[in-house]
Amino acid sequence: MIRLHHAEQTRSMRTLWLLHELEVPFEVVLHPFDKSLRDPAYLAISPAGRVPSLEIEGDTMFETGAIGEYLCERFSPEGLGRMPGAPDRMDWLVWMHFAETLSQHCAALTQQHVALREDAMRSPIVMKLEAARVVKCYDAIEAQLEGRDYLLSSGFTAADIGVGQAVYMAQHFAKLDRHQGIAAWYQRISGREGFQKSLPQGVPLFEQSFFEPWPVV
């Protein structure tokens, strides 16, 4: 049995989307994105109190990239995964983990715009720097997509899921107006049933669709 510990509009959406694409039986334990993740019972599964974490046949896993690699190796080695010896194994690994590069900048921006409640606590410098770094990540993705429908020439993989989920979050802070290749790719992958099933069902973490670098007060 696979049990995913998930909080909506967080990195764990990547794992949820991947599980839907894999079409394997699983259940979801939905957590609020708050201090309850520090509960000792949950820390026994995820020592840093983060999501996602995965329970699978008596074992536990945490760290999004590791979970993605393991699930692909086990359930879709030649479909959503690219195993050792595959011609595009290197690209698959790079883009599987590039998702975390973009997500780190999104996490910093989420802290500035959402988690910090008072304007005096926010930093306009951090906001602008991190938003600019998101755009630099967009530049890298745009270059990779040149002449391709997906991140790998061989087709849709878990790398598109990971980076796609990061772009889903990043659009709260940097628009895709100047990245038409990403916009077309994102429209393609976000139309997939697995993505649609992974969207938040409850109250979203973000109260607005886009955040300017410095909030209007």
Image (cartoon, rainbow, N blue to C red):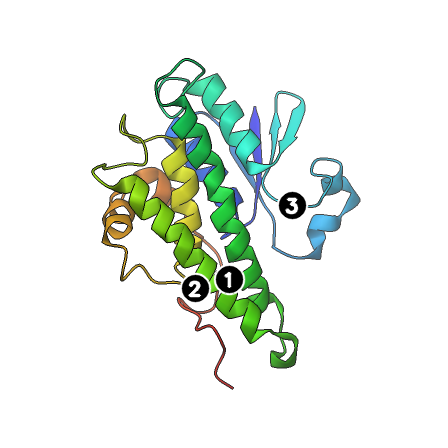
Q: In the image, residue 203 lies at what x, y percent?
A: 49, 61
- Which residue is more in the foreground, 95 or 215? 95
Neighbours of disc 2 within 10 Å: few (<14), some (14-19), many (20+): many
Tag 3: amino acid? Arg
User: In the displayed image of the protein, which residue is found farthest to the top?
Assistant: 85
Q: CA distance from mark 2 to mark 3?
A: 22 Å
Element at badge 1? helix
Q: Residue at x 72, y 41 (%)?
A: 42
Where is residue 3, by image quadrant?
top right
The answer to whether the residue labelled 2 contacts the one labelled 1, judged by CB atoms less than 8 Å apart, is yes
Residue type highlighted by circle 1? Glu
Residue under label 1: 130
Label 2, label 1: how many angstroms apart (C-alpha)? Answer: 9 Å
**Number of the label disc, if any, that sits on residue 173:** 2
As drawn, is 60 to the left or to the right of 107? right
Q: From the top left corner, tell me how far across and down residue 11 is, in percent.
A: 52, 46
Residue at which label 3 appears: 50
Of labels 2 and 1, earlier in sequence is: 1
How crowded is the residue under tag 3: few (<14 C-alpha within 10 Å), some, or many (20+)? Answer: many
Residue 74 in picture, x, y percent from top left: 49, 18
> What SS does tag 3 mark?
loop
* Residue 141 visible: yes
Closer to the eye: label 3 or 1: 1
Q: Amino acid type of disc 2?
A: Phe
